[in-house]
Amino acid sequence: MKAFVYQGPGKSAVEERPTPDIIAPTDAIVRVTRTTICGTDLHILKGDVPSCQPGRILGHEGVGQIEAVGSAVQSFKVGTRVLISCITSCGRCHYCRRGMFSHCTTGGWILGNTIDGCQAEFVRIPYADTSLYPIPAGLDEEALVMLSDILPTGFECGVLNGKVEPGNTVAIVGSGPIGLAALLTAQFYSPARIIMIDLDDNRLEVARQFGATDTINSSDGHAMEAVMALTDGRGVDTAIEAVGIPATFELCEGLIAPGGTIANIGVHGTKVELHLERLWDRNITITTRLVDTVSTPMLLNLLTSQKVNAKRLITHRFKFGQILEAYETFAHAAKSGALKVIIEA
Amino acid sequence: MKAFVYQGPGKSAVEERPTPDIIAPTDAIVRVTRTTICGTDLHILKGDVPSCQPGRILGHEGVGQIEAVGSAVQSFKVGTRVLISCITSCGRCHYCRRGMFSHCTTGGWILGNTIDGCQAEFVRIPYADTSLYPIPAGLDEEALVMLSDILPTGFECGVLNGKVEPGNTVAIVGSGPIGLAALLTAQFYSPARIIMIDLDDNRLEVARQFGATDTINSSDGHAMEAVMALTDGRGVDTAIEAVGIPATFELCEGLIAPGGTIANIGVHGTKVELHLERLWDRNITITTRLVDTVSTPMLLNLLTSQKVNAKRLITHRFKFGQILEAYETFAHAAKSGALKVIIEA
Amino acid sequence: MKAFVYQGPGKSAVEERPTPDIIAPTDAIVRVTRTTICGTDLHILKGDVPSCQPGRILGHEGVGQIEAVGSAVQSFKVGTRVLISCITSCGRCHYCRRGMFSHCTTGGWILGNTIDGCQAEFVRIPYADTSLYPIPAGLDEEALVMLSDILPTGFECGVLNGKVEPGNTVAIVGSGPIGLAALLTAQFYSPARIIMIDLDDNRLEVARQFGATDTINSSDGHAMEAVMALTDGRGVDTAIEAVGIPATFELCEGLIAPGGTIANIGVHGTKVELHLERLWDRNITITTRLVDTVSTPMLLNLLTSQKVNAKRLITHRFKFGQILEAYETFAHAAKSGALKVIIEA
Amino acid sequence: MKAFVYQGPGKSAVEERPTPDIIAPTDAIVRVTRTTICGTDLHILKGDVPSCQPGRILGHEGVGQIEAVGSAVQSFKVGTRVLISCITSCGRCHYCRRGMFSHCTTGGWILGNTIDGCQAEFVRIPYADTSLYPIPAGLDEEALVMLSDILPTGFECGVLNGKVEPGNTVAIVGSGPIGLAALLTAQFYSPARIIMIDLDDNRLEVARQFGATDTINSSDGHAMEAVMALTDGRGVDTAIEAVGIPATFELCEGLIAPGGTIANIGVHGTKVELHLERLWDRNITITTRLVDTVSTPMLLNLLTSQKVNAKRLITHRFKFGQILEAYETFAHAAKSGALKVIIEA
């Protein structure tokens, strides 16, 4: 089969690979019909993710059809259409039993990282019963690809951890795909105000269309003052960090009201400064999280009942044969305006 | 009346002052029968607390008897014995209505800070109805002084924020009075294990007597390894920071298990390094808090039913005339072995 | 002044009464500009509410302007426009300190019940600082009247207690004003499905316009089967009882899925049968609640940001001189189609 | 092998049965070393549990040693000592993924009910990875048998659902084994007061030894008045129903304070009267629950750290050959004083 393979820092190619086989009785093989590219895939290509070694097929998002199942798989049969979760969950370890699938002792984020992933014709999914979801009839496959990773990540790491509540004021720092996913899902809880902060006016315009009540271009270095002006000097109840660099995290420290929560989504490569000399008595909470995908059944319900328009995150579509072009488009988002790109089999 | 007064960095004295008067209809005047000294008072004396200006009577803890009440005070009459809360709460502003008395817009920590405090024969208490508590009959006054600040602070900032739960593993970094208050109140939730960490073997010995299941002297720089050895490499569910310097906060970052909570109690004078490059995907929570004293009624219940022995925090007793000696003893705790000192009228 | 007065079972009239005076330093006198009628007022008129004695001015909802304040009132001045809460809260008792204003030891629901109410030109409001809310500039007064009682009641007793969550399935039994208030506010949490159940097709049509995804006319006695058909035999996550009779509560018992919550809003005059022989092992929760109005600030935020259209509950408008006609219209809602009626000064 | 078999209403016997075999790849066969008898077993023998048909081997509690495992079992090997959970959990269905193992779509309470149970030399355990727990080294086997059902039931259905908190007042109605299990585990949260109510003075004496602060013999019909006298007329924060008849549930309705919770543990055979005409405005919560055994890992931690003395529930010990005598003793608890009886292989 054809597969997109990481070949070491700065190198990648479409290779011919053998179709994967069932290894454990809990495995399933899925024929991938649609996949996408994540910001993390770009990090891997640069060599920034040491757990992912050269030779690895990338990709941890997608939908497809069951091709084969191991003897212990109960919930799926050959032919069932499924959503692939970016997180593999054994359902048995003490983390899985507590709903913290991200830290599953034999799973977690392994697809396209420590085992071969979805940017291929077929993929082997361990613990299929607890890592795949059957697709309700009539659901749009493209929208579903957004439920593999980006929507649950924005929701769980940003909105749930950030304790977004009706009537509250929320700031989201970073209006890229993950910030916009947080923006879409924050509206499940009807905050009174969502302030979107970014350096790029085009992305802020997208944010307004997606439901932001206010936008701030932070390139002048005065975002904090602008937020204080909007909130009578109080700051925000929830600040969602959706970039992953010290400057944006420290901006969140400045925006947060007493009693508020900073919910980090960003993948950080370096430490940040935490100003406890100002924050120790402010009754704030800071959270970090790798998505657990516990919210996937809920998101499927909301997609089915058309309470969330996940598809509006998709800006470009490619065939699998054009995957290099898809990477090119996604990697140069400022120029292409790309948010999420769909790669169809 | 006699009062202990901050006279500027490094200077203080007992002065003769006029007895305070009712200013607002919600005020009460309390004759102080017992007070104590807080670590914060030492910070003020060094000049580290800019909000507290020279000429201020210090002290924000104590018990006493109502001497006079304003026209709008409903809950107290002359003669009632009362517990003074370190936090003044108006009961009306939006922070008070949410239970966040620490950020009361016209109260909060003001006693012995921005208004005159309890280390005097009399003290004026604003918003008496919501800042004083009647003392149940038969309760020991010395034990009650521990409910003005130190027990609610250990409980709310450390134990409640730290989400201590039955069966969990807790580490407390710092075995001074506030760490020991966290240790006493953590046991309300029956954690399986409480690991106390300090540089002083005497304080660790006290911690063992107070209920710590394990103690670690961190002076060798290997506390993190020791905690990992005790927890099969997992780390702790709750890490309580009870010192207030970068080294101890960063130790907590190293101790915390995936899914765990770092609850800061320490008063920090400088920023710390937050290692998000290691923690962004660990599903952890960090909290800060100035005590709200919302738990005071509950602590009074537990004191009444003898479920907590607050008095064991008291090591020394003085008359008000000996207050300078009391400060001396408290300031040199390593030598004197002082935890809390009682100053009796 | 003119006032609408309960004169004993079946009797009421507009009477001339003296303008109220400040009694306690925490009182305010409000000139009522708009008020409304509650289902409870009809119960009083029938003689069903023994706490309300003949001679009482009715009414516990309204907006107005401050006419006078007592010496201890801090938050309001003469001339301020205010929202009157149906619940009077002292802000000091242990119920108020826990946010359970409904059980305030000297307040709670007293307006138009044990003290004179709002269906008059002026009303005395005890504990003004904690029982009135300043009106943000630019807000529509009619919409605000819905925040005195009906919206917080639907939200707190139905939606909050019922733990409505994104993606869940909710059934609301009773599509009168209070059921519709629950319907409007349930949407703050984006449930996937809201099933409205009533005997009256007109009210069900209103429910559909207000956002119900499904409606069931229960007059054929098969509502339970209809809900099971809609939910693949599982039942609903939340069942909100908004009628107050045994049949509708027992219908909720039949609708609820394992793990679900029955939230009672209805005012019950008689006991109901609880089928524990079927429910003991179903992991369900049942809640009751008199509204606390803790959500009023949040609802004001959502009204200001136009996230809730409270005004659509209003069907009729009268001048105070027409109050008897207003009662007539409201009492015969099946014929008049009345939901809430506004009575303007 | 020898097994205790239900033969129809009023009939039971020790029979010779074939040793069970692995049927599914997720099964394990356990050699039972210790088991016990539950009140539910007595109900089955009377014919009160229609799901349990004649010919069934009874028993859903016990500890033992792994004798064989299916091909998909990952966590256990032949020879491992294990605790058997009374609840079988597949770990895959939507109830299991939410932590509601009691309603597992292919598991739940099936052992000794719809499949053969533990009162035999061997037992087949479906979904072994998620229905058995490895026994930490050094733990007493007898104490562990209390963790199969009775301690998690008292804790989850009574204490957790009842929201027992530090400083609160708790009433437990019924001082039999399950009420005493609630009493032992309620103390994990340090309530100020635990009032035990029963008809039998001997059981109340046991309750006092187990930590009850007050006891009331309700045989005079004045238990409600006695509780009100103990609580200044307020009632209790938590009322735990541990009997299962209308009279005791209705007593709980009378005992509960505004804002309180009634947590039902009792297995009810008939409906009860819910006095909503008194309770609709009292802000109370009522819960029901079949134990999920989600708390088993926590209870194992507390047993290991000696924070709970589970063994004190055991009053009698028998060999498997004496199982008929064990049933006799357990069935006549009033005479024998039996709480839990251990049956050793």
Image (cartoon, coloured by chain):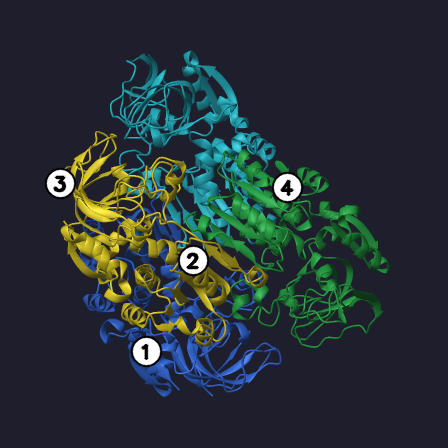
Chain colours: A yellow, B green, C blue, D cyan
Badge 1 amino acid: Val
Marks 4 and 2, how far apart in space? Answer: 32 Å
Marks 4 and 3, how far apart in space? Answer: 59 Å
Q: Which mark is residue A263?
A: 2
Residue that badge 3 annotates: A79
Instruction: Describe residue A318's horizontal placement relative to residue A242 as left or right.
Output: left
Q: Are marks 4 and 3 on the same chain?
A: no
Mark found first going from the N terminus, 3 or 2: 3
Marks 1 and 4, how far apart in space? Answer: 70 Å
Badge 3 amino acid: Gly
Q: Are marks 2 and 1 in contact (CB under 8 Å)?
A: no
Residue under the point 70% across and 56% down: B39
Residue C142, by quadrant, is bottom left
Task: Give percent across and percent down for residue C262.
Answer: 35, 53
Instruction: Describe residue A258's horizontal placement relative to residue A241 as left or right.
Output: right
Q: Are marks 3 and 2 in contact (CB under 8 Å)?
A: no
Marks 1 and 3, how far apart in space? Answer: 58 Å
Q: Chain of mark 3?
A: A
Q: Chain of mark 1?
A: C
Q: Are marks 1 and 4 in contact (CB under 8 Å)?
A: no
Instruction: Describe residue B336's horizontal placement relative to residue B136 as left or right.
Output: right
* Neighbourhood count class around disc 1 (C-alpha, 10 Å): few under 14, some 14–19, many 20 upward: many
Residue A23 versus residue D69 in the image, above or below: below
Q: Are marks 4 and 2 in contact (CB under 8 Å)?
A: no
Query: Which one is in front in this view, the residue at disc 1 or the one at disc 3?
Result: 3
Marks 2 and 1, how far apart in space? Answer: 44 Å
Secondary structure type for disc 4 = helix
Task: Give percent across and percent down for residue B151.
Answer: 65, 52
Q: Which mark is residue B218?
A: 4
Q: Quadrant of the N terminus of chain B?
A: bottom right
Q: Which mark is residue C341?
A: 1
